[in-house]
Amino acid sequence: MTAILSIHRAGPLMSVQDSGRYGYRSRGVSTSGAVDRDAHAIANALVGNEPGAAAIEFALIGGSFSADRDVLIAVTGGNCPVEISGKPVHTWESHLLPAGETLTIGALRGAVWGYLAISGGIAIPEVLGSRSTHLRTGLGGLDGKTLATGDNLPLGEAGKLKPKTLGVPYLRSHAPICIVPGPQDDYFDEEAWKTFLRQPYRTTASRDRMAMVLDGPALKAFKGHDIVSDATVVGSIQVPGSGKPIVLSADGQTTGGYPKIATIASFDLARLAQLPSGQEFMFRAISADMAEELAIHAEDRLAAVIGGLKKRKG
């Protein structure tokens, strides 16, 4: 009989996400997947799953859950209160959740997106090769929707339940967010680029899985703020007539009609997405070659963290 994870209280924007849905952007299907792919992969590795397995993503606040069999759970993304039957446990570690006992996840501190991985993974059917939920179109996940109180999720088969912890600290830099100029960087003159790279911007509460609006100095496109719609990618920075940059996220549309001054480097996407609302940061322009080199370094670092997991004592 299939094991079940029951949701007794669901936090905001809670959904099923895996590593994403690839190969369909040319047909208008967004990539989706976890906003913070490193935190998602680490959570899965802590419970013995493949890094890309389906897990639960939530924004700001978790919720409460129980399973009808013994499972391992891990909560990552940021730090937050986590309790199993009223007993506090640590984030970024896996813990045994005995059958019928309650897991409670509180509010994230210093982060926006959290992840709950369960041993065996969430075994809902795949849609176009992925279990990820695309909320705007209702594709994938559990009936294409956010998870709600009373929902039940089937779990896959798990191996031995051996709790683990990080053997290598997983820390993120506070350096400027790296961007690669283009494809419409020539719509912005030298003054606009000075503003973009020398003035701080702030994250705002105007964000979801599709995009984030940034606050800060307005950017003027001297060639105009309307273009013939063309392709976008996750991390595209669109600049509409308001001059306020919009960064596309995991569920972002596949085309857009605003000029794109730059693209967030892939290895810095999660770092930007995890900045709390009101947090100031700077941009740094790098070449595509440098972005590729740094992305490889980031992948090696994640592999080292996952490879360095060790058995948790106690």
Image (spheres, grey):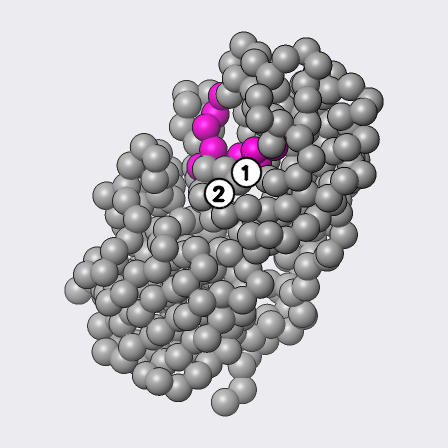
Pointer 2 residue: 206
Vertical placement of residue 80 versus 152, above or below: below
Q: What's the residue at 49%, 21% (across, down)?
A: 255
Q: Is residue 253 magenta?
A: yes
Q: What's the residue at 63%, 53% (across, down)?
A: 279
Q: Main secondary structure of the magenta part?
A: loop
Q: Position of residue 7 (x, y in %)?
A: 26, 64
Residue type marked 1: Val
Q: Secondary structure at mark 2?
A: strand
Q: Is residue 249 magenta?
A: yes
Vertical placement of residue 235 versus 203, above or below: above
Q: Secondary structure at mark 1?
A: strand
Q: CA distance from mark 2 to mark 1?
A: 6 Å
Q: How many marks?
A: 2
Residue range in magenta is: 245-255
Horizontal relation, residue 63 to residue 50: left or right: left
Q: Residues within 10 Å of mark 2 (few under 14, many from 20)?
A: few
Q: Looking at the image, do the residues carrying marks 2 and 1 touch, with CB atoms under 8 Å apart?
A: yes
* Mark 2 / mark 1, whichever is N-terminal: 2
Horizontal relation, residue 200 to residue 22: left or right: right
Vertical placement of residue 68 versus 261, above or below: below
Pointer 1 residue: 213
Q: What's the residue at 53%, 40% (across, down)?
A: 212
Q: Position of residue 132 (x, y in %)?
A: 38, 44
Q: What's the residue at 37%, 51% (across, down)?
A: 13
Q: Residues within 10 Å of mark 1 (few under 14, many from 20)?
A: some
